[in-house]
Amino acid sequence: VQLQASGGGLVQAGASLRLSCVASGRTMSRFPMAWFRQAPGKGREFVAAIWNSGSLYDGVKGRFTISRDNAKNTLYLQMNTLRPEDTAFYYCAARNRDGATMEASEYDYWGKGTQVTVSS
């Protein structure tokens, strides 16, 4: 499975971005997928996950929305009202088993990431 994230960029605080992650090599519709982020000098942080039964967020609910288009095998992250503290590399991940989790070590496939920079 290959994951390719895109959609990052440099924006001002308050702006919006939509990240995309296209999966290839396998249909991922039945498995959980997630977004993580990593800021300079910090560890990888869980952002949101989605699976057949719902979605899970950590600290960004209300501003970020995770979704997926199973027909396109694509994961999205709509990010609104961006803040400078949202600046990070954003990675998409997929799990080869049922059940969503916030633990990065539980995900089996990772994309290379896309940079999001929010200026104040």
Image: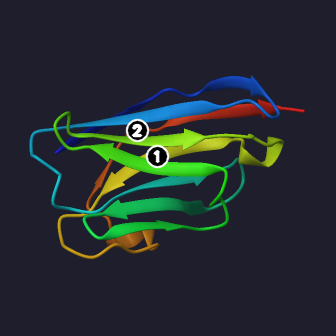
Q: Which quadrant would residue 46 be assigned to in this image? A: bottom right
In the rendered structure, which amino acid carries the disc numbered 2? Lys
**Are discs 2 and 1 less than 8 Å apart at CB?**
yes
Image point 68% across, 49% down: which residue? 39
Question: Mark 2 or mark 1, which has the lower sequence index?
Answer: 1
Instruction: Name above or below for residue 19 compared with residue 44.
Output: above
Figure quadrant of the N terminus: top left
Label 2 SS: loop
Image point 77% across, 33% down: which residue? 118
Image point 48% across, 34% down: which residue? 19
Figure quadrant of the C terminus: top right
Label 2 or label 1, whichever lies nearer to me, is: 1
x and y, in percent, of residue 76 in the image? 41, 41
Using residue 117 as the reference point, say whether residue 1 is left or right of it. left
Using residue 109 as the reference point, say whether residue 105 is left or right of it. right
In the rendered structure, which amino acid carries the disc numbered 1? Tyr
Label 1 SS: strand
Image point 71% across, 32% down: which residue? 117
x and y, in percent, of residue 112 in the image? 40, 38
Task: Give the crowd class for mark 2: few <14, some 14-19, many >=20 residues within 10 Å.
Answer: some
Between residue 98 and residue 4, name the one nearer to us: 98
**Residue holding disc 2:** 112
x and y, in percent, of residue 116 in the image? 64, 34
**Residue holding disc 1:** 91
Instruction: Name above or below for residue 9 compared with residue 30.
Output: above
